[in-house]
């Protein structure tokens, strides 16, 4: 059982509030000037990864108070409860064990007194055998040809994880091409399938529940498309496999249970990339790379369990987030990878974070009196610089940002990579130091601007700076680093949920819309009386009229 402490009633919380008032008067430039060892003191390393927390608007005393907050809220005990398989997802009565999926230690992990180690190993072996068959070409399609294209059909956690990782690890792609179809918008499946050959295409139907409307609709359309070729029902087994916890529904759909890869209810959808949901990765990157990805995450799990607060990277990330959201007034956090292949990284953690911590009811069933999960957003640099960075530099919002990059690139053409990295460093520097009025005036004067022009234009060219960033650097984007990085963000989310006294592993907030969509669908297809508010009724009527459907 997790503690049920209202964080705003703790001793540390009140002290943090007054500390934040003090810190709001400070400038990051001064913090660096006061302490030449700030970088050394505030950087943390894990394997290849360097986390530079020094450009954050925080000092040692604030961090000590956050450590106290963590201990008052039972963070350590909460982490232990998760790692040991306790049913900490209390609203769904489930354990939360994505860490078990990447556990390469000898430690046995129990759910309801039963070890899960063997089950996990079995599925990993099944994934390895299957991906080897597909990659080697020994698995043949119905006409005897090898598989060239893999289409993963899933949504949310059954899509974003594998899609993000497949993109991020492009340099590791083999000859197979993986595609990801998620949206129920027919554009998605149509545009994906239009260039594919059914004889050489394998579908992975990925759904924890195997009931999700979008996925089942896309899966049925894929089956129809497949059967429109010369294939027969018997050929489905060679072209459709399923990843799910729901064996019955998989069989109902017509997929041979021997072509089913299971996972378990103790794997949350948005934490499932480590499970058989990663099957497309095992195929498209090779099983060895998939395993390296798991091992990278495992190393971060060990770090989480073993390092003390000061040296614990996910704890430091979580502490900073809480500091900004609850004490410094931040409403959002940006994640900006200076790595084009990581272009879905922010979108992935948008789900990971916002679905986990976007909640206003606490573990006592009461409405919280403080802010919980922030808005997560971001796009890769340098593109973001030409889009939303204006607001980050000179807007009225306070937006802490993570910058992620790698010292080396897989792509050695020209000097692209050094230009990329110089932009990364320049932006974090600029966000921090800004540019004073005096500097702007002197610069304009040196360029020969008139006094009048300087007076008129200078205010627009001033940057306050003092915008906090965390820089995360690695050697080279590879499966291990990516695994470790994702695990660090996952743990950050959980730790924050522990402090905010919310349940991070359920997602009741997505249910209402799904249920209402089911009431609207027949009104759009069959007509009938519309018992809805005036706006929804008016919109339904518009669509009916435009589509020639009689009421
Ligand atoms: O894997 P599935 O059961 O198809 O679920 C797919 C997704 O839909 C749900 O509504 C949740 O919002 C997500 O957390 C989940 O990942």
Image (cartoon, rainbow, N blue to C red):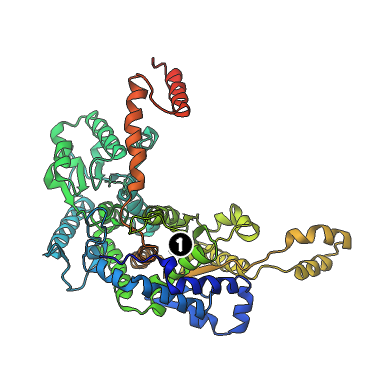
How packed is label 1: few (under 14 Cα within 10 Å), some, or many (20 or more)?
A: few
Q: Quadrant of the N terminus?
A: bottom left
Quadrant for the C terminus, please.
top left
Name the element at disc 1. Answer: loop
Q: Work out whether residue 474 can be spotted.
A: no
Q: On the image, numbered disc 1 is attached to which residue?
A: 411
In-front residue for pair 133/53: 53
Report which quarter residue 242 is drawn in.
top left
* Residue sitting at x 37%, y 24%: 524
* Residue 179, position as x, y percentages in the image: 34, 45
Residue drawn 43% across and 68% down? 9
Q: Position of residue 98 (x, y in %)?
A: 26, 61
Specify the quadrant of the image occupied by residue 51: bottom left
Q: Nearer the viewer, residue 38 or 5?
A: 5
Q: How many marks?
A: 1
In the rendered image, residue 21, in percent from the top left (x then y), is placed at 58, 71
Relative to 194, say whether 417 is above or below.
below
The quarter holding residue 107 reads bottom left
The answer to whether residue 96 is above or below residue 148 is: below
Q: Position of residue 18 (x, y in %)?
A: 55, 73
User: Viewed as shown, does residue 284 lie left or right of 121?
Assistant: right
Q: Is residue 73 left or right of residue 258?
A: right
**Left or right: residue 239 compared with residue 515:** left
Q: Up-down: is 499 above or below 544?
A: below
In the visual, does 430 lie left or right of 473? Answer: right
């Amino acid at each position: 059982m997790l503690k049920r402490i209202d964080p705003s009633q703790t001793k540390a919380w009140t002290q943090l509030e007054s500390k934040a008032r003090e810190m709001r008067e400070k400038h990051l430039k001064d913090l660096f000037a006061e302490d030449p060892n700030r970088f050394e003191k505030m950087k943390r390393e894990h394997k290849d990864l360097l986390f530079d927390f020094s450009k954050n608007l925080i000092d040692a005393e604030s961090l000590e108070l956050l450590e106290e907050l963590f201990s008052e809220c039972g963070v350590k005990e909460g982490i232990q409860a998760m790692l040991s398989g306790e049913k900490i997802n209390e609203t769904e009565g489930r354990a939360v064990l994505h860490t078990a999926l990447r556990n390469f230690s000898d430690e046995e992990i129990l759910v309801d007194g039963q070890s899960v180690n063997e089950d996990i190993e079995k599925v990993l072996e099944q994934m390895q055998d299957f991906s080897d068959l597909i990659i080697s070409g020994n698995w043949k399609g119905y006409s005897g040809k090898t598989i060239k294209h893999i289409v993963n059909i899933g949504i949310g956690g059954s899509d974003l994880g594998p899609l993000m990782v497949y993109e991020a690890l492009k340099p590791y792609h083999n000859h197979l091409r993986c595609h990801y179809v998620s949206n129920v918008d027919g554009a998605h499946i149509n545009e994906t399938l239009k260039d594919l050959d059914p004889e050489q295409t394998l579908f992975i139907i990925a759904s924890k529940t195997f009931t999700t409307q979008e996925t089942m609709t896309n899966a049925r359309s894929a089956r129809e498309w497949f059967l429109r070729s010369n294939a027969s029902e018997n050929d489905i087994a060679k072209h459709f496999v399923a990843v799910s916890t729901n064996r019955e529904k998989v069989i109902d759909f017509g997929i041979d249970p021997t072509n089913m890869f299971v996972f378990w209810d103790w794997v949350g959808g948005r934490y499932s990339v480590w499970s058989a949901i990663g099957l497309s990765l095992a195929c498209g990157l090779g099983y060895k790379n998939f395993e390296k990805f798991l091992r990278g995450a495992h190393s971060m799990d060990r770090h989480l369990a073993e390092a003390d607060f000061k040296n614990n990277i996910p704890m430091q990330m979580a502490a900073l987030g809480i500091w900004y959201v609850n004490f410094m007034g931040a409403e959002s956090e940006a994640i900006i990878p200076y790595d084009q292949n990581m272009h879905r990284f922010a979108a992935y953690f948008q789900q990971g974070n916002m679905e986990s911590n976007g909640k206003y009811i606490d573990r006592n069933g009461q409405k919280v009196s403080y802010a919980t999960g922030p808005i997560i957003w971001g796009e890769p640099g340098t593109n973001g610089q030409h889009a939303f960075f204006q607001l980050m530099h000179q807007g009225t919002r306070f937006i802490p940002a993570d910058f992620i990059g790698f010292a080396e690139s897989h792509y050695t053409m020209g000097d692209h990579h050094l230009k990329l990295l110089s932009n990364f460093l320049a932006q974090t520097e600029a966000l921090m130091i800004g540019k004073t009025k005096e500097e702007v005036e002197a610069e304009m004067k040196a360029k020969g601007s008139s006094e009048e022009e300087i007076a008129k234009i200078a205010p627009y060219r001033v940057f306050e700076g003092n915008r906090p960033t965390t820089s995360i650097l690695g050697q080279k984007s590879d499966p291990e680093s990516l695994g470790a990085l994702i695990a660090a963000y996952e743990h950050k989310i959980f730790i924050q949920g522990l402090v905010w006294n919310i349940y991070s592993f359920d997602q009741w907030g997505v249910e209402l819309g799904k249920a209402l969509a089911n009431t609207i669908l027949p009104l759009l297809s069959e007509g009938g009386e519309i018992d809805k508010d005036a706006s929804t009724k008016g919109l339904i009527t518009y669509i009916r009229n435009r589509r020639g459907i009689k009421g």
